[in-house]
Image (cartoon, grey):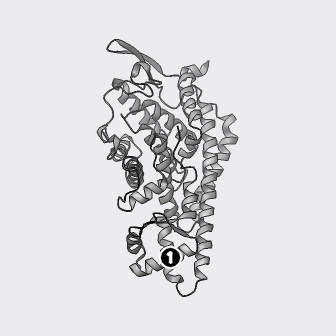
C-alpha cells in the first residue's frame, strides 16, 4: 500500500463531448524511498558487466570505430521500435552519398538519430544534460523525414496520447500541456540531484520511465528516452564512451517493456522495473563485449590472411582498414577513403572477394557496392526489422 503514494495524479479532462483521464507523474526520486537492498546482487552484476564493456575501449585497437558502428546499430534498433523498417546495411548505404536502395523516409529517421547522438556527445563537453540539450537533440532527431512537421525542438503545447485515435480511447495519456513545464522542471532537477546519491544505473532506469511518461514532444519521445540512458551513464562517470544501448533488449522484450511502464504508473512499484532494466544491462553489456571481441578477432584474422598474399598485401591492407570504418562501400568512396587509385581499389576489391572477405551486392556492372559480410553480420545481429 505504501507504493500507492508513488502513483501519479489522475486528472479528468474533456475535449468536445468526450471525457478522458491524463496522468501526471510524481517527482523523482520515488517516495517512499526505493527498497534497493534486494536488488544489490543484480546491481553488482550489472555494474560488473558494464565495467567489462567499458574496459573493452582500452583493449580493442580502435575504440572510436567500435563506437561509430555501435551508435549506428542503436539508431537502427531504436527507430525499429517506432516502426521503421531500415536495416544497418540500409543506413550505411544511405550514408555513402544518398545512394539508392534504402527506404528514404525510414533511413532518414535513423540517420537523424545518429546525428542527434553525435551532437549530444559534443555538447556535453560544455553543456550539462539538461532540457536545453534535450530540445537541441529533438530538433536534429526530427529535422528530416516524417517527423519534421511535428515541431522539432519544441515542447508540445497540445495534448498527445499513446495508442488509440484520440485521448478518449488511448492506451495512455501523458500530462496535459498546462502541467508539462512543472513536470519537466522536476525532471531536470532530478538529473542534477546530488542529495539522494542513487546508483547511476538506478538513476538511468528511473529517468527513462519518467521521460516516457511525461512524453514532452509530439513525436520522437521513445527514441529520445532511449538515448538518455547512455548519456546519463557517461555524464555520471559510469562509462567513458556511450557503448551501452538497451534498444536490442527492449525490442526483444517489447511487450514486457511496455507492460513494465504501465505497471510503474498503476502501482508505483519501481523496483520491478529496475530489476527488468538491470537484467537488460547485464544481457546487453555482455553481448556488446562479446561482439567487440569477435570483431577484433575477425580483423586480426583477415589481416593475417591478406599478409600471406605477399606483394599486393599493402594495398589490400589499406582497403581492409577503410572497410572497417565503412563496411558497405562503392569504389568511388573507397578511393577517397583509402587514398588508393581507382585501378588499385578495383584490383583490391577483386582480391578481397577471392579471399571471401567482401561480396559485391548489386550484381551490376556499374555503381557496384561491396559489403564486408562477416563484419556486417556481427554488427547486424538482432537488427532485422520487426514483423508485426
Q: In the current view of this chain or complex, which residue is farthest to the bottom?
A: 311
Residue 292 in sight: yes
Q: Nearer the viewer, residue 100 or 86?
A: 100
Within the image, what quadrant is residue 369 found in? Answer: bottom left
Q: Is mark 1 on a helix, strand or loop?
A: helix
List x then y, in percent, for residue 107: 40, 50
Please state which of residues 343 and 17 is positioned toward the viewer in this rendering.
343
From this view, report whether residue 102 is shown above or below residue 214: below
In the rendered view of the protein, which quadrant contains the N terminus?
top right
Residue 332 image point, x, y percent = 37, 71
Which residue is disc 1 drawn over? 350
- Position of 2 with respect to 173 (left or right) is right
In front here: 146 or 33? 146
Q: In this view, does 40 lie above or below 30?
A: below
Image coords of residue 372 (percent x, y): 52, 66
Direction from residue 85 to residue 33 in the image, left or right:
right
Drawn side of residue 269 relative to residue 83, left or right: right
Residue 326, visible in the rendered structure: no
Residue shown at 59%/60% (left/top)?
Answer: 292
Amino acid at each position: 500500500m505504501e507504493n500507492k503514494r508513488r502513483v501519479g495524479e489522475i486528472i479528468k479532462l474533456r475535449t468536445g463531448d468526450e471525457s478522458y483521464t491524463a496522468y501526471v507523474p510524481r517527482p523523482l526520486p520515488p517516495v517512499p524511498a526505493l527498497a534497493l537492498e534486494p536488488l544489490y546482487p543484480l546491481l553488482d552484476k550489472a555494474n560488473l558487466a558494464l565495467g567489462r564493456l567499458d574496459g573493452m575501449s582500452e583493449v580493442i585497437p580502435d575504440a572510436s570505430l567500435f563506437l561509430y558502428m555501435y551508435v549506428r546499430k542503436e539508431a537502427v534498433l531504436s527507430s525499429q521500435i517506432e516502426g521503421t523498417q531500415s536495416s544497418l546495411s540500409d543506413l550505411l548505404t544511405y550514408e555513402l552519398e544518398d545512394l539508392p536502395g534504402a527506404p528514404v523516409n525510414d533511413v532518414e529517421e535513423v540517420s537523424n538519430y545518429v546525428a542527434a547522438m553525435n551532437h549530444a556527445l559534443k555538447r556535453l563537453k560544455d553543456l550539462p544534460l539538461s532540457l536545453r540539450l534535450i530540445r537541441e537533440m529533438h530538433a536534429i532527431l526530427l529535422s528530416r523525414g516524417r517527423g519534421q512537421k511535428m515541431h522539432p525542438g519544441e515542447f508540445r503545447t497540445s495534448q498527445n496520447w499513446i495508442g488509440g485515435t484520440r485521448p478518449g480511447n488511448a492506451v495512455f495519456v501523458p500530462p496535459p500541456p498546462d502541467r508539462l513545464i512543472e513536470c519537466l522542471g522536476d525532471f531536470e532537477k532530478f538529473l542534477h540531484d546530488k542529495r539522494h546519491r542513487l546508483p547511476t544505473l538506478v538513476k538511468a532506469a528511473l529517468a527513462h520511465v519518467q521521460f516516457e511518461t511525461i512524453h514532452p514532444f509530439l513525436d520522437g519521445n521513445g527514441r529520445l528516452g532511449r538515448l538518455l540512458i547512455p548519456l546519463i551513464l557517461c555524464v555520471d562517470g559510469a562509462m567513458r564512451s556511450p557503448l551501452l544501448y538497451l534498444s536490442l533488449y527492449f525490442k526483444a522484450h517489447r511487450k514486457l517493456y511496455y507492460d513494465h511502464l504501465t505497471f510503474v504508473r498503476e502501482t508505483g512499484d519501481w523496483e520491478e522495473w529496475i530489476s527488468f532494466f538491470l537484467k537488460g544491462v547485464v544481457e546487453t553489456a555482455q553481448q556488446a563485449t562479446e561482439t567487440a571481441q569477435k570483431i577484433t578477432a575477425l580483423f586480426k584474422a583477415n589481416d593475417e590472411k591478406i599478409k600471406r598474399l605477399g606483394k599486393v598485401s599493402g594495398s589490400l591492407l589499406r582497403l581492409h582498414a577503410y572497410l572497417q570504418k565503412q563496411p558497405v562501400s562503392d569504389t568511388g568512396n573507397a578511393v577517397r577513403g583509402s587514398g588508393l587509385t581507382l585501378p588499385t581499389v578495383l584490383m583490391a576489391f577483386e582480391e578481397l572477394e577471392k579471399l571471401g572477405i567482401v561480396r559485391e551486392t548489386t550484381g551490376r556492372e556499374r555503381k557496384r557496392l561491396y559489403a564486408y559480410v562477416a563484419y556486417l553480420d556481427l554488427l547486424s545481429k538482432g537488427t532485422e526489422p520487426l514483423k508485426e
